[in-house]
Amino acid sequence: MAETKREIERKYEATSGTRVPDLTRVPAVAAMADRGVTELDAVYYDTPDLRLAADGVTLRRRTGGSDEGWHLKFPVASGIRDEIRAPLADTLPGELAGLLRSRVRGGEVVPVVRLRSARDVRHLQAADGTLLAELSVDTVHAERLPGGAEATWTEIEVELADEADAAEGADEALLDAIEKRLRKADIHPSSAPSKLSRALEETSADGDAASVGALAPTGASAPGGAPAPGTAGHAVLAYLREQAEAIVALDPAVRRDLPDAVHQLRVACRRMRSAFKTYRKVLDRDVTDPVGAELKWLAGELGVARDQEVLTERLRGRIDALPRPLRLGPVRGRLRTWSAARARSGRRRALAALDSARCLALLDTLDGLLADPPLRAPAARDARAVLARAVLKDHDRLTARVDRALALDPGRDLDVALHEARKAAKRARYAADAAAPTLGKPARRFAKRVKSVQSLLGEHQDSVVAREALRELADQAHAAGESAFTWGLLHGREEAGAAAVEGELPAAWSRASAPGIRAALTR
């Protein structure tokens, strides 16, 4: 079974003659313990066109050392990566292959570089002997595969100890202090973010497009006739590429069940789908409408688990807020049982969708659309005018829906109308977000005001969904011979909360629809 480790490290240039200074002068470091030299042999894998390297992802099979096996690394921030480890095997473990699926698709990974390293290790320890960080001087020999160029270099790597084993004070401030000491010894940070990137760079032939610096992220290619900067086509495609890259990058995060990953992947799908609708004057709808339908499908499959998670958190919070005398019967236990069954089903459904041929086909379609976009004539026009007009049109659509809702009395029709207004608010906000790099502060201000309306409408819709769930839980409790009092009480409180939202909406809408907010977009 694979395990995950957060890797926080920094790399420095060195030569065979570089001497590591005494680091016990660094605060918190009491000793440098020599751990000897370890021989490491790692083969790095990638797609033939180096998609993983382009996205800063590395996959290797390493022998030697205490952590031999398969290692898959995803970038988190500068100098920080999550490393997923699987036991040594002849072939790529299935769990790691799944985490690569959004990038590899139906292709395969092949050996691209072999790195053999002699690692001279020193442990930086606290006064009580607890490990703070590991410093290694690595003499690296790289060989491009199959049978390509070779390169040799020396580098220094400083990595914080694993969180579970580290002493107090083993954090990035320690790395800063160590770096300051190394700089005084004329040892400076490496220009290469990883051994693999350096190996690919130094073993590439002149003009070789496989050099990491020449690579573009997955799905980000564009034809030679791409729209010129400043045009509507250029602005819209830049936004769409951001969403496509997010969809690819968030797939493994969903598989790893990382916090908020499902939500963020759904948002990327929704933003792209919304942009297809908002900017239909820029992109041909005959092409984008079918793609939008597939994005809607994927977001829906992912949404089962996410929506259940949000609903459970809401109901649990409502129960916890009740005084004990008002919690009649095993309400927490019933909620837990009801939610667990739905959550398991939702996660299975989400993973099945990501593994499906339909999802892989969608990813390929997005790549094709961005590589050869179906641009219409307005795509060549000035971005400011085209984007502002599209944002205002979405705001007009929102205005019509809010006005209709505000004219209705409380009840089912109002609930439906407010939900439709919420979807229109989300679309108007996404439209402004897409236009913000072009329109600047007016678009950001517009998005902020519309978001406040969207948040109110979202709270109202959450209340509608919660009331449906509470009725179901009350029915189950009654059928089991339990008291349904608490569920009914919570239902009443949700109704009161929805009424309060309905009362706040006119003022929030007045701020979001002020003439100055709209006028600023066209100045």
Image (tube, grey):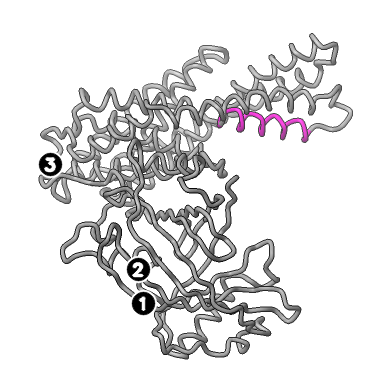
Label 2 near label 3: C-beta < 8 Å? no
Q: Are marks 1 and 2 in contact (CB under 8 Å)?
A: yes
Quadrant into which the N terminus falls? top right
Magenta span contains residue 17 = no
Q: Label 1 to label 3, Cα distance in Å?
A: 51 Å
Q: Which residue is mark 3?
A: 381
Q: Is residue 213 visible?
A: yes
Residue depicted at 41% across the width and 58% down the height: 43
Q: Residue 13: horizontal and vertical position, in percent? A: 39, 79
Q: Is residue 415 left or right of residue 244?
A: right
Lower position in the chain sequence, tag 1 or tag 2:
2
Toward the top, the furthest residue is 479
Q: Secondary structure at mark 3?
A: loop
Residue 119 on image: x %, y %: 50, 75
Outermost residue to the right: 325
Badge nearest the viewer, 3 or 2: 2
- The residue to which callout 1 is attached is 153
In primary-sequence order, the first of circles 3 and 2 is 2
Quadrant in which residue 510 is drawn:
top left
Q: Nearer the viewer, residue 185 or 477?
A: 185
Q: Residue 134's x, y, as percent?
A: 58, 74
Asked if one can make out residue 503 in the rendered structure from this viewpoint, the answer is no
User: Callout 3 environment at 10 Å: few (<14), some (14 to 19), or many (20+)?
Assistant: some
Label 2, on which residue? 142
Distance, label 1 to label 2, CA atoms, is 9 Å
Mark 1 or mark 3: which is in front? 1
Amino acid type for the residue under numbered disc 3: Arg
User: For the magenta stretch, what is the residue range?
Assistant: 306-321
Nearer to me, 408 or 356:
356
Question: Local crowd at mark 2 within 10 Å, few (<14), some, or many (≥20)?
Answer: many
Residue 219 or residue 336, whichever sits in front: 219
Residue at x 86% of width, y 23% of height = 328
